[in-house]
Amino acid sequence: MKNCLLIFALILCFINSNAQTKMTITFNDGTQKTGMYTIKSKTFSGSTSLSMLVSTKPKEKIKLDDFKSVIVYEDTIKIIYEVIDVKTNFKSKKTEKKLGELSYSGPLINMYFVKEKLFSEGYNGKILDMDIFHTYIKRKNDSIAYNMGSVVKSGAPSLKNRIKDYFTDCPKLVEMVELEFIDKYKTKLLIDYYEQKCSD
């Protein structure tokens, strides 16, 4: 019975993910293309590492390696996504491509939200399907974005340690976090402080 519920939940997710939206894609060579696409993942987990843009008319699949960014038009709103190389651990050599929603673009740092799917067994054996948003930040002159939010992963450094590793050029900011004058979970406040007080 539990397996049937899981399969049903996954089918519902698949059906709901088929709606196409107008998008403008910027490819790696700078060319652009506008059409009707869906952002899909190759896995039921919804990992954005395996995301692609899919069109049904004509049939087309565009992988993360093939484009730089995409603008999604939803009613009167434009949502910008960028393909970013990410790390959770500052000292790790391994990077992973993700599709990040650009939530803030400042003079020094960009902030992205990366959506992941989480399936878990809930009350009475029901399968719960949750979207989890991870926060990544990237300096304008860097090629890697780092996770500055909660991490559902064993062995990941604590958030305070990630802040300390990332903002080595701004000890004042690290001290403010350690003394809890700035909430470590308020990523935008960290960015604001850095851009205002540490950019000299």
Image (cartoon, helix red, strand yellow):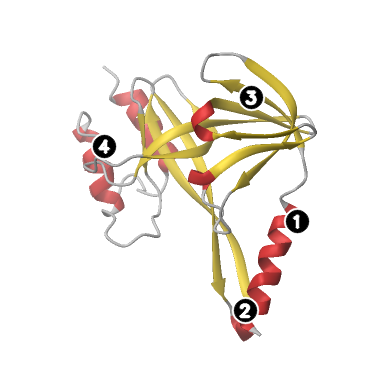
What is the residue that sits farthest to the front in this orientation? 59
Find residue 86 and report its image quarter: top left
Q: Is residue 186 above or below residue 124?
A: above
Amino acid of disc 1? Ile
Residue placed at 59% from the left, 21% from the top? 26
Say few, some or many: other residues with alpha carbon within 10 Å of mark 4 (under 14 / 14 to 19 / 20 or more): some
Q: Nearer the viewer, residue 116 or 104?
A: 116
Q: Nearer the viewer, residue 97 or 192?
A: 97
In primary-sequence order, the first of circles 1 and 4 is 1
Q: Which secondary structure lies at badge 1?
A: helix
Asked whether, in this view, residue 144 is left or right of residue 27, the answer is left
Q: Which residue is mark 4?
A: 166
Q: Which secondary structure lies at badge 3?
A: strand
What is the residue that sits farthest to the top in this orientation? 30
Q: Which residue is mark 3?
A: 25
Q: Nearer the viewer, residue 140 or 143?
A: 143
In primary-sequence order, the first of circles 1 and 2 is 2
Amino acid of disc 2? Asn
Marks 2,4: beta carbons within 8 A: no
Residue 182 seen in this snapshot: yes
Asked whether, in this view, residue 70 is left or right of residue 110, the answer is right
Q: Which residue is mark 2?
A: 3
Q: CA distance from mark 1 to mark 2?
A: 18 Å
Residue 179 seen in this snapshot: no
Q: CA distance from mark 2 to mark 4?
A: 43 Å
Q: Which secondary structure lies at badge 4?
A: helix
Q: Which residue is mark 1?
A: 15
Asked whether, in this view, residue 120 is left or right of residue 53, the answer is left
Residue 112: give x, y in percent of width and height.
Answer: 49, 37
Amino acid of disc 3? Ile
In primary-sequence order, the first of circles 3 and 2 is 2
Amino acid of disc 4? Tyr
